[in-house]
């Protein structure tokens, strides 16, 4: 795609407060369904985008916990505060998961 086309798509996504990927998916579905109107549900789209970000965050936390477990299993001790930081991060991510789930539940009502 040309730079101009990319700019147009990015602007359209920004105008709808969704990611470019979400906008392209909605546009593709609209065409596939025979529509010329791109319908978005900003609340649902935001929740889905948040879940994607949470998947990345959970993966990173899991990696940190695995590294701590490796140290323990090798008979060592993690760095001071390392386990507390990992647990704090787990709790923060779980709160975000709960918030995203609440948005999805409210969407169903």
Image: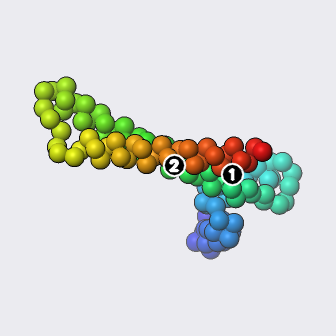
Q: Position of residue 11 (x, y in %)?
A: 64, 72
Q: Position of residue 28 (x, y in %)?
A: 73, 52
Q: Position of residue 107 (x, y in %)?
A: 73, 48
**Disc on res. 96:** 2
Asked whether, in this view, residue 30 is left or right of residue 91, the answer is: right
Can you say which quadrant of the picture contains the N terminus? bottom right
Q: Which one is in front in this view, the residue at disc 2 or the one at disc 1?
A: 2
Residue 79 location, quadrant: top left
**Disc on res. 100:** none
Q: Nearer the viewer, residue 53 or 19?
A: 53
Q: Nearer the viewer, residue 26 or 87?
A: 87
Residue 27, visible in the rendered structure? no
Q: Position of residue 61 (x, y in %)?
A: 37, 42
Q: Nearer the viewer, residue 21 or 98?
A: 98
Mark 1 closeness class: few <14, some 14–19, many ≥20 residues within 10 Å: some
Asked whether, in this view, residue 30 is left or right of residue 93, the answer is: right
Which residue is label 1 attached to? Answer: 44
Label whose residue precedes the other's in the sequence (2 or 1): 1
Mark 2 closeness class: few <14, some 14–19, many ≥20 residues within 10 Å: some
Name the residue at the left extreme.
76
Can you say which quadrant of the picture contains the C terminus? top right
What separation in Å lies between label 2 and label 1 (alpha carbons)?
Answer: 15 Å
Instruction: State the colouring used for the structure image.
Output: rainbow
Q: Residue at x 45, y 46 (%)?
A: 93
Q: Residue at x 17, y 45 (%)?
A: 80
Asked whether, in this view, residue 76 is left or right of residue 13, the answer is: left
When the figure is inspected, residue 45 is found, relative to residue 101, above or below; the finding is below
Residue 44, visible in the rendered structure? yes
């Amino acid at each position: 795609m040309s730079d101009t086309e990319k700019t147009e798509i990015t602007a359209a996504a920004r105008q709808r407060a969704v990611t470019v990927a979400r906008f392209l998916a909605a546009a593709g579905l609209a065409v596939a369904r025979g529509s010329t109107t791109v319908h978005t549900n900003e609340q649902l789209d935001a929740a889905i985008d948040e879940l994607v970000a949470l998947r990345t965050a959970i993966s990173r936390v899991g990696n940190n916990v695995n590294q701590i477990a490796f140290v323990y299993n090798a008979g060592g001790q993690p760095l001071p505060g390392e386990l507390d930081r990992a647990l704090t991060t787990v709790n923060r991510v779980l709160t975000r998961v709960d918030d995203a789930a609440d948005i999805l539940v409210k969407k169903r009502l």
